[in-house]
Amino acid sequence: MSITYLDAIREAQARALAEDPRVFIYGQDVGDFGGAFKATKNLASQFPGRVKDAPISEDAMVGAAIGAAIDGMRPIIEIQFADFSTAGFNQIVNHAASLHWRTQVPCPITIRLPSGGTSGSGPFHSQSMEALYAHYPGLVVLNPATVEDAYSMLLEAVSIDDPVIFCEHKYLYYHLKAEALPTEALPVGKARLARPGRDLTIVAYSAMVHEALAVAEELAGEGIEVEVVDLRSIKPLDTDTVIASVARTGRLICVGESWPWGGVTAEVVSRVATEGFNLLDAPPMRLNAKDTPVPFHPNLWAAHRPTARSIANAARRVLRS
Amino acid sequence: MTTKKQLHPAAEQGITRGMVPTVITDPVTSDSQTDQERFLSSFRWMLLARLLDEKLASLYRAGKIHGGVFLGRGQEALSVALAQALRSGDVYAPLIRDTAGRLAFGETPLDAIRTCLGSSLGPMRGRDGNVHRGRPREGYLPMISHLGAMISVVNGHLMARQLRGESGTVGAACLGEGGTSTGAFHEALNQAAVEHLPLVLVIADNQFAYSTPKSRQFACDGLVDRAVGYGVHGETVDGTDLAACLDAITAAVDRARRGEGPQMIVAQLLRLCGHGEHDDAGYIPEELKKSKVGRDCLKVAEEDLLHKKWAGPAEVAQWRRDALQVLDLAVATAQREPVPDPYKESWCALASKHLSEGYADV
């Protein structure tokens, strides 16, 4: 049996629907059609009335999720592409995120964002929004990088009493496979040591974890041991695991697919610099996408975001300094 | 050391009905009321709301209130009529000029004053203020400032009930004519129609959104014309006429409750105050103030009830004194209450404390 990252997301939702009558799914084309990516395939017939097509109204979709959550439900909202979540941004950051702090009433909603670039998708079907949402207090932001995490973190997201921004990577949907669904998992909020090493720490998340692992494999042939930390959760961010890794290696590169101004990589480097400056043997480095919209053409797209090749070049520079 | 004065028991409570001494109404039982009883109880909520607003305005002028103060002067009839038509279990999302509706829905004057003064015993505990108050678990939603945003949240409550197979409750949202220019309004009204939800949307067309006249807000003849485009039942009403508001809104709420889908009510009235107490509203033309739309709904209602001999001037004067007594007690109570302490604040926005970043500890 082989399970893809996308299967895992579907299976997690099926299990959440089966186990908890408060769960329902609301999003564009999620009903009988099964979703633009088929992440809700067959769920509408399996769980009649609980997998609902929404009009193209992201603001009202998230608004309705907030009301349903106050009324005791646990909605899962599928935003068709993460990029479109800006059309529901107000309800997410101003309403869902502030509700508990203002009223002491929890807002348990899960907002699934099919994120990240795939070749040919262009400026409006490729974005990674985690930094934007992590900036706002009151949200939990998750970026699973493995089939196992896609399953277990989505299940945990639905059980969390706060709004969760669940950034699932579209490139990983079909490219990642596992033998079986996991039976145990690290809790949300803990980073994972994806590969141990002693010479250099690469902190990554989502699809970039796999680019980092490819670099580690390549550099292993040159006798260099790269340690790869998979953040898993962007907010909260597991600073302890990152610092512990830098304490072992003395060198840090942080890689993100999102844009360079601020964001996750800046946050990681900032935390290591403030809390673990004396652990560093070389200036920390960060790699991000270029500071332009995500390009359409595959040639441009391949150069727009960090890849194993650009990360390997950066790694050699950090190791020389 | 002075002895603490014994408070009126109702002053200690949160959301409750029947706060005003001898007030005769309870929205839960409003169905069994006669027209006269409904009118009189509505009038008394309006009177209490007007006096509460005046109390807040004087506290603001005395520098006792942080931030803004926003009043519902001139909108009491429309506001109270909606709350009077709601029952326990319904969802209510008032907006900034709904002091009367809030009180009639069950908010105590003490809760209102606590929020404006920032008491840590109020429902918002100093974390949010003025009109941003509510008790969501009791169906009383605290608005965010972004207009139109509350409508889809009410829809969500109603969808939750639909999913659970529950019927019989409705959800009500309030908006001004300016708020109808938002995308949120359009998305939410369309959503309610698609899902056939028992939503009642009450639009107070008070002629100005802050300083912007409605001619700069929309170009259709009347906002109610939009209802048909959404597949929603629409009605207009004279927002200065309490009896008309009660009839129109009660009928709309009843239609929604019977399963006839979303209802839209557009009321014509005039905001008889500034956008907030910082605003002298010099942009409102005198002729508009003197026109029918500029009538004071409280005065109109008082004249109406005196004319019908449902009460005499002495009774009205007594109601006013009763209301003032309640308000004075509530202000005195709230002023003695603790204010929020930054050293005791958790500074954690999440319900899941274990997922907090814990910056405060760094």
Image (cartoon, coloured by chain):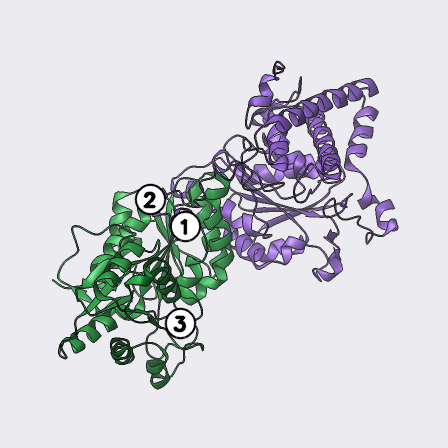
Chain colours: A green, B purple
Tag 3: amino acid: His
Q: Quadrant of residue A74?
A: top left
* Secondary element at image label 1: helix
The answer to whether residue B39 shows anywhere in this view is yes
Q: Residues within 10 Å of mark 3 (few under 14, many from 20)?
A: many
Q: Give the spatial CA distance, label 1 vs label 3.
A: 34 Å
Q: Position of residue B251 (x, y in %)?
A: 62, 37
* Secondary element at image label 2: helix
Do marks 1 and 3 share a chain?
Answer: no
Frontmost residue, A181 versus A78: A181
* Residue at mark 3: chain: A
Please name the residue that numbered disc 1 is placed on.
B359
Q: Quadrant of residue B36?
A: top right
Q: Which mark is residue A79?
A: none
Circles 1 and 3 in contact, beta carbons < 8 Å: no
Instruction: Say above or below: B73 vs A255.
Output: above
Q: Which mark is residue B354?
A: 2
Tag 1: amino acid: Tyr
On-image quarter of the N terminus of chain A = bottom left
**Quick check: A153 left or right of A267?**
left
Q: Position of residue A87 (x, y in %)?
A: 49, 62
Please name the residue that numbered disc 3 is placed on.
A125
Residue drawn 20% across the image and 60% down it: A193
